[in-house]
Every structure is written in structure tokens, then in C-alpha cells.
Image: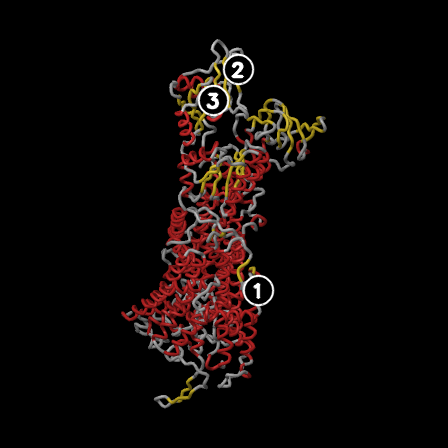
Amino acid sequence: MNPTDWLQLAAFLAALIVLTPPLGAFMARVLQGERTFLHPVLAPLERLTYRLIGIDPTREMTWVGYTAALLTFNLLGFGVLLAILLAQGALPLNPQGLPGLKLPLAFNTAVSFMTNTNWQAYSGEAALSYFSQTIGLNFQNFVSAATGLAALVAVIRGFTRRSTATLGNFWADLVRSTLYILLPLSLVLALVLVSQGVVQNFSGYVTAKTLEGAEQVLPQGPAASQIAIKQLGTNGGGFFGVNSAHPFENPTPLSNFLQLLAILLIPAALTATFGVMVGDRRQGWVLFAAMLTLLLAGFGASWWAEAQTNPLTQLAANMEGKEQRFGVMNSVLWSTATTAASNGSVNAMHDSLSPLAGGVALFNMMLGEIIFGGVGCGLYGMLMYVLLTVFIAGLMVGRTPEYLGKKIEAREMRLAILVLLVPSALTLLGAAAACLTPTALASLANNGPHGFSEILYAFASAANNNGSAFAGLTVDTPFYNYALGVAMFLGRFVCLIPVLTIAGSVAAKKTAPFSAGTFPTTGAIFVALLLGVILVVGALTHLPALALGPIAEHLLMLQGRSF
Amino acid sequence: MTSTFDRKLLLTALRDAFRKFDPREQIKNPVMLVVFVGSLWATGELVRDFSPFNLQIVVWLWFTVLFANFAEAIAEGRGKAQAESLRQTRTHTSARRLDSGQESTVNATELRRGDLVVCAAGDIIPADGDVVEGVATVDESAITGESAPVIRESGGDHCAVTGGTRVLSDRIVIQITAEPGGGFIDRMIAMVEGAKRQRTPNEIALGILLVAITALFILVVATLPAFTRYSETAAGQPAGTVNLSAPVLVSLLVCLIPTTIGALLSAIGISGIDRMIRRNVIATSGRAVEAAGDIDVLLLDKTGTITLGNRMATAFIPAPGCETRDVAEAAQLASLADETPEGRSVVVLAKETFGLRARDLAPAEATFIPFTAQTRVSGIDLHGPKPRRIRKGAAEAIRQLVLADGGHFPEPMKSAVENIAKGGGTPLVVAENDRVLGVIELKDIVKGGIKERFAQLRQMGIRTVMITGDNPMTAAAIAAEAGVDDFMAEATPEQKLARIREEQAAGHLVAMTGDGTNDAPALAQADVGVAMNTGTQAAREAGNMVDLDSNPTKLIEVVEIGKQLLMTRGALTTFSIANDVAKYFAILPALFAALYATDATANGPLAQFNLMGLHSPQSAILSAVIFNALIIIVLIPLALRGVSYRAVGAVQVLTRNALIYGLGGVIAPFLGIKLVDFILVALHLV
């Protein structure tokens, strides 16, 4: 914890806070179909896209139509990606002549990228051709994030519109999100990353001789273009196997700073977009404040845990699994941010984090990826917690609970609870299944409570669409490929569909005007209540499992015991 | 709270609580059903593997179910007692039905809507209906508890009669308006008994939340054995190091699922309706009680709610050259025959200020001139040696009269009239022959304390709108004096209805009171429509509440009861969930105490989380279960009474309740469980 660390932390937080309002306002304009400074350049492209796919962007859709379009688009994308991965051996841009993937891995990977999870049971440079990476995966990197944005904007419209059946047009929201938000930001970030030394080419791998005289294969490829969107779109799927710990993927402190910022940039700014669109910026700042509090609490705990002397090694700074060029602070800030934001990229090996820092990463995901969370889905996930908070606390002021003037009734409650429940259920059931399956236990590299953490982490990561790996677990097996694939699929869509149903439900309602008797959803009290509900629900659900994993490991480490 | 818990009621409730062990009853409450099934499972295990510890666990699990049954039974019991007394009034009566002019005696249950029946003095009215002929005094104490008889007459707003009430004098013909079993008293009995009690929308939503939380904890507990098995293997310890027997697992589950609110939820709902009934308001559904809490616009009739009855004479203002006493004397004479409340108030004021007594005048001495729409004045012609023609009426009408007789309307009188009108009063000018004597000021008397009441409502976020037939100037003055937020002057029933629709379209929830038939559409349109019991049948049918005391001010109390109902639910839900934190700290360290221990006697690392310093793993689990069961009993009075309510803004209410039930809910069980543990150890039960 030296001054440089504090300075970098301050710079990171300042950048995040300063960029949130302008980017948020810009995204609100885009998502509401208003003109922006990019329109002179991109509007023709937007119109062309509509003409090519043959849709009328002004045609309003009901929640059913919106959901159907979203599902159709995603399932089609899944099919195409699956086909590419299976057939990559016969496809172009494959200088290394890599063969097609086996079905379980192809299934797992296709689900993973469609659901914005980017769980990787493969190592990019060893398994995937440039075609699979740039055309297959990278397309999904953009559209899975855009899908999240589209779903979010539909939810916001649900809350702002009154007594209507429609939520907007999915195709228009998808195209605008991609064209005006994700593409320009990615382009800028990719160019800066290239300037820092991130590779961007279609060459074959280079063989070099090291100083010691050994031979080393240096992988190449169109990395920068993919890394930019993987960070910005909370995808997280690295071009190379070790993700942003790889020197070609994340070479310098500056590239690290920008990639770190890119993880949280859009999810954070979306809180401001929300504030603008609902017509009360404080509503957005309240959510931002709650998210930032959770992020900083998690980071603080992780950083503290990493700085403690490990009785087993007698080392004060835990550098195992970390890159020298980033150090402890940047590594745990990343591990906190990437698990908070459903990104899942890593710049240090989470398996080697101290037990509590690993536990924080795990807990971040278990909360449902709502600490900024994924692009779009983080905020709508947070809104489900808001509905829960408003419901419980709102009753305490003696009125039928309402949020933004919409009454929260049985239907909304049922759906919101489902969204909060499903990922937790998938995590617990998946981990329990693995604990009872000998072949699944055979994948473990570690014993003791750490092994349990590895299993728990894998399912928490998949069910909450994070995609980061604790590693230490051999996951390219049929059990994990299918089990985690199903968890990712259900974790995404069993949440997305109820969320859109809620949007349709509240859009049809009248909007009650604000009065002194209304439960206030701005202000410190609300932030405190929201945090209370998130922590209590999250902790009560996962405390037993966490006690058997990271907490037990931490206590055993203090006793000097290892397994 | 002697009335809440009298001995008989408690015994009946206890008996009913045992009766509710019937699975058909249990299935109605999913949270408690889980406890019920879990208790059954644990009992089965007890038979297989008996130990004093398991026995105590099982006994307390069953107590948990019993306490929940008891909470519901006691809430229902209070309603049943009331229903019983209502039922006694509904003796089987016969009716004299009119069939084309012929009377025939039939059983009251044979009456159908539209039938005509005759009731004379001493008869019990056989069913709800409207008087279509005659006038009678009726004893309605059976439903209102009010012993003074009321007048019921055909036509107008006092034509409705209720089955079960008794005609005291005269003879009336009643047209039946209710089918058998659908009458007012029947509905009242059904309501208070909770027989037809349907769960309200908010109760359903909360129920879903509770079921979801329960499902989540079932998952947590169900996956625990798999996680534990892994951990035991990883620790190199034998299976069974962690005691996951059925009684222990069920204990953990029962402590985590929201049993507190689950057990008290229906009691809270029933007691909300009960509180309404205690204030003599009958809600036709629990839904209406709940909606009352959401009301943010109150439409209040000026007369009777904001002001005391009618306008009263408050001052006599003499014209130049006249004495006040002369004005009073003339005004009194002109009002002697005026039976309207205003007219009587003039006589009263004259007596109070100048000791002028009302005189009886023989027809030979005087002729009374009644008010007509054409002349718009009333008064008296005194015969005798010096004939006097005294008139009182609106300024304009008197002016024309005086001018026509060659007199003049003095300037100071004009300004006096204007001043009174501006101040919200009504000026009545008194003239004798061609001379204007002065002005009577009639004023609405705003009820004491009503302004403060409205200020409270404003803090609660409720807007008050005064409805009046007065002209806008008068209305504005009274509105300002009473402190309402808005007013509707010269309001017609149609405008009232339109106003309600307008408010609702803007997202407001509207409550109003009404009694006349022309109020019925508005009562039906309002989210909460409180009909006065003295009102017409149509009004009582249209509203979703009936106020037996016919006191329009009670609307405010109705709103408060609705809010209190929702607050009680929210508070106990918060408390119930917050309790789980402490229960985890009791049970988890107890469960995992031996895990990863280095030898069989030592504690493992997770035992450190025994923050409360509970005596042993067994005492910890037992204490949590006992606390969980007892807290239900402890909170029954709160559930029945409702959380304390003050008319303050949402932020204050929230802060207060969040602290008491949220933070308190976290802290209380730490103390409670420790206390139970202490007692268990002291009694050598573990």
C-alpha cells in the first residue's frame, strides 16, 4: 500500500465518476433515438442496416414481441457460432491449421459468448482460429452486450411510459447500441491499446529463441480489436488463454488502467442513462452510490487480505499468480471490478488470491452481478433488488410499494424474485451436483476448502454470466462443459425473460405522482436499505457455502494449515 | 388490552389452534406448511434415533406450528365473537309480502329482490330494502349500537332500511333490494368472521415473496449435505462429523424461513378489518382496507366534515340609523316560522345576544311568508294597528323589493354585504316595509382541530379537496380557513364523478364519503368510497365501506388504519428476515464446530463464529429453534394491534421503522438466543 497505489486508485475512481454523467447522457440520447454528434457519420450506416435486415425501426413492440425478437436473434447467433466452432478446421483465417472443436466444448463456448458470459474452457491461442475469434466470438462480443443494452432500455421504457402496451423496437435498440455506443468506444480503445503494444495482425505464430537458448512460440493475431470490446462489453473472453495477464493482451500500466476502466465504464454510465431517461438524475446516482459502495467495500477487503502476512509463506505481499508490472493493488482492483461487473477478464490468477480476496470475487458474483454488473444486465439486475427493497421497505411507510410511480404488485414481485433466485439456485445446485459426482471431483487440482471454492466459483461464474475462472479446475470435460453451459443459458434467459415481462407489466400501469407519502427512492436512507437488502439476501443465501470455502480456508491458513 | 385477550377468547383460540393441525388448514399457508412437513419428518427420525436433544427439537418444532395456528385463531376469534352477537339479532323472521295489493305471510328467506313487504310498529324488517311508502322510526341499534331511533321515509336520502332492524312506529312499505343471504348483516357477518376473507393483492404479493424466500432456504439447506460431505472428505474426517440429522436440518430450515411473518400474516390482515369494525366501519373487502392506505386524495364534503352541519347566524349588522337590537328583533320575527337550520340559528342568536324570546303569534296577528324560488325572500306580515312587513333574503332580492316600494338601499349596507361574502359568510338582508334594517351574517363554522388534521394529512402526502355547493368566493374563504388543499365550488354529482376520474387518470387514488343516491356513481368510482349508514341503499351498495356512525370525518381514520395494516406487514417481514443473521451465527458455528478440527475433542476453525458464546452446539441449535417459536407468541399482540402509527412523512416513518424492525431485528435475536441458551443451561436441559 504505497502512495503510487493510492494515486492509481484515486485516478481510477475519479475517471469513473467523471465519465459517468457525459457518457450516460450520450447513451440516453442514442437509446432514445435522438441525434448525436456521431449521426452525420453513422446515420446512413444505421439506415442501411435497417434496410438490409428489412425492419422498420419505428414499429413498436409489445413485451412479448420484444422478447421473441431478442430470443430469436440470440438463438440464431448461438447456432451460427456453434457451426463456426465445429467447422473451424475447414474455414479460412486459420494459419495454425487448428481443428474444429468437439461438441461439448463448442456448445459450452457458443452458449458462453451468446450469453455475454465468456467462460472459456479452452485456451484461445491453442484452440481457436482467427476466423473463430474475429468473426465468431467477436461478433457475439458486440451483440451480446447490445442485447443487454436493448433489454435495459426496454425496462427503463416500461417504467417511464404509462398505460401502454409497447416497449420500443428491439432491432432498433440493438442496432443503435452497437453502432453508436459499442463500436466507436471499441475503436478508440483498440487504437490506444495497439499504441501500447497489443498485437493486431493475421500472421502465423512466431518462434523465437530465448536468452537461455530455449525455443518459444509467440502467438499472434487480431487481438486489440477483440480486447477492446471484451472489456467494454463486459464480455471478458480473452484472446489469449491467460487473458489480460498476457503481455500481448495487456502490456503496460497504461493499457492496464484503460482496460480496468473499460470494465466498469458502460455499466457505471448506464446509471446516469437511467437517471436521464426516468427524468430524475438522482435516481441514477442512488444506484451508482450503492454499486460503488459495494465495489469499494469488496476491494477494501481484498486489498487488506492481500496485504496480510501469510503464516505459511511468511510473505507480506502475496505476489503469487500476479504480474510484476501490475502489482498487488492493480491486481485486486481488477479482480474486484471484473467479478463485480460480470466481465470475467483477469490480469492475475484468481486461484492464487488470498482466501478472502478470492471469497470477495466469489461473493461479488453470487450477489447476481449487480455491482455495476454486465452491460445492461447489471442495471436491470440491480433494479430487481430495488423492487425487492421497495417492496419490503415500501410497506413500512404504509403504502402499496411503488417505484418511479409504478405500483409493485404480485406479478412484478413474482418475476423479480425469480430473477434474483435463479442464479443462486443454479450456483448451489450445480456445486452440489459437482460435489456428488466423482468425475467432477477428479477435475480438482487442489484439496481442502480451496477445492470447494474452485467448484463453487465455476458455477457462480457461469450462473451469473461472469465468465471469470478461478482456474485450478479442469473444466474442458463433458460434465463441466454441459453443466456450466446449461447454467449460463438459464442464468441469462431465465432472468432476461422475467425482466422484460416486468417491463411490459409496469408499462401498462398508471404512474402515481410523487407525494410526501411516497416511499423515497433517492437519498441516503434508500441507499442504506438497498445495500441492506442486497447483503442480507446475498449473505443468507451463500453464507453456508462461503463458510465451507473461502472462510474456512482463511481460518485454516491463519492456523498454518494447508491441504 | 383486556378486550384483546379475555380468558374465553384465549381458550377458544387455543382449541382452534389445535384444530388447525389439520393438513387441509396447513396447506393454506406455504411457509408454515414447510414447518409442518419438516416437523413430521423430524418426528419420524426421532422414532428411529431417540435422544433428549432430538426430542426437545421436535417438541419445539411442533410448538412453532401451534403458535402460528394460535396467532391466526386468536385473530379469527375476535371476529367470530362479533359475528355471534350480530347473528343473534338476525332471528328468523316472517314477512308480510304484498302481492298485487294482497298481503301474505311468508318466511323472510323467501323474499327476492323487488318484492314489496309491509312493516308496522314492532315488526323486524325482514331484509334490506328501500322504503317506497310511508315514514317510520326505526331502531337500528342491532347494527350501529346506537340506541336512538332513526327516521326512515320514502323518497330522498333516508329511504334505506336494513334487515334485522326494528320498526318502532308507523307503517311502511319496503321494496326489497337484497337476495337472501346477500343482505347487509350477512355481509357484515361474513366479513368479521373472515369466512369469505380473500387474500388481498398486497398480501398475495408478500406471500409470493415469503414463498420464494422459503424456496431459497430449502435449496440452501438441501445442498448443505453435499457441501458438507465434500468438506468432511477434504478434512480427512469421517462422515457424520457434521451432524446433519433430520432434526438438525429441519431446525436450520425452520429458523431461516420467514416463520415469524408467515405465522402472523393472516392475523395481521384479519385484525386490520377488525380495527375498522371497532371504529364502526364495515369494509366490504379486505382489499378496500388495503387500498385505504394508498389514498392520496380525499374528497370531503364541506358540510358535516369540514364545517359543523349548516350555516349559522353569527352577527347582526345594523344599517345607518338602526340599532342592532332592532335588526335582531326584526330578524327574529322574520325567522319564527323558518324551520331551516339557518332560520333557527337566527332565532337562537337573537335570544343569545338580546334575550329576545320567541313568541307564539296567532294567525290573526300575523301571516308568515314562506321562501319561494320566485320571490327569493321570506318573512312575516304583522297585522294590527301598525302593520309591519318584514322580509329577509339575499341582498339583490331585498334591494329590488325596497326599490319597488320607493325606498333605497344604503351604501354602507352594500359594503357590509360584500365584506361578509368575501369572508366566506352568507349575508341575509332584513328589511321592514321600504327600509333596510341591517344584515344577518350567516357563517359556516369550521370544526375545531380540523385544520391540524389536514396539516397532518398533508405531511402524510394526502391532498384534501373540499366539495361544496357554495359559490366559489364563499368556498375559497372556507377552504382557506379550514386549510384544505383544493376545493370544488358549486359542485354537482356529475362534476364530482368527473373530478374523481381526472384524479385517477393522473395516477391518484381517491377516497370520498357520500350518502345520497346521486353520490352512488362517485362512490363506486372512488378507490375507497365510504357510504354513510344513514344514506340510501344505492349509496351503501356503491361504496366499499359503510360507516355505521355516519361520521364523514372518519374517512381520515380509515386511511390511517389502511396504512397501519401495510406498515405492520412490512415491519414484521423486515424483522423476520433480519432475525436470520443472528440465527446463522447461532446455528452455522454449531453445525460446523468439529469440521477441520485437528482431533476429536478440539473445535475446528469455524467454531470461532460462535459470537454469542453459546454453551454447546446442541444448546445453540435448540436456543435458535426456541427463540424462533417464542418470538411468534411475543409478536401476536403487535400483529393484532398494528405497529404504532403517527401522521408524519414517509421519510420519518421509514427511518423509524427501519431502525426498530430492521436494526432491532438484527440485534434482538442475538440477545434472545443468548438468553434462551442461558436458561437451557441453567435448567440442565442440554
| Foreground label between 1 and 3 | 3
What element does badge 3 sit on?
helix
Q: Position of residue B446 (x, y in %)?
A: 42, 31
Which residue is identified by label 1? A68
- Name the one closer to the observer, B103 or B406: B406
Q: How packed is label 1: few (under 14 Cα within 10 Å), some, or many (20 or more)? A: some
How was this image coloured? Answer: secondary structure
User: In the rendered structure, the residue with mark 1 lies on which chain?
Assistant: A
Which residue: 69% across, 30% down?
A: B106
User: In the rendered structure, the residue with mark 3 lies on which chain?
Assistant: B
Asked if labels 2 and 1 touch by Cβ distance under 8 angstroms, the answer is no
Q: What residue type is labelled 3?
A: Leu
Q: Where is residue B143 in the image (x, y as percent from the top left)?
A: 55, 32
Q: Which amino acid does label 1 sit on?
A: Ala
Which residue is identified by label 3? B403
Q: Where is residue B596 in the image (x, y as percent from the top left)?
A: 40, 67
| In the image, residue A88 above or below residue B570 | below
Which residue is identified by label 2? B367
Image quadrant occupied by the N terminus of chain B: top left
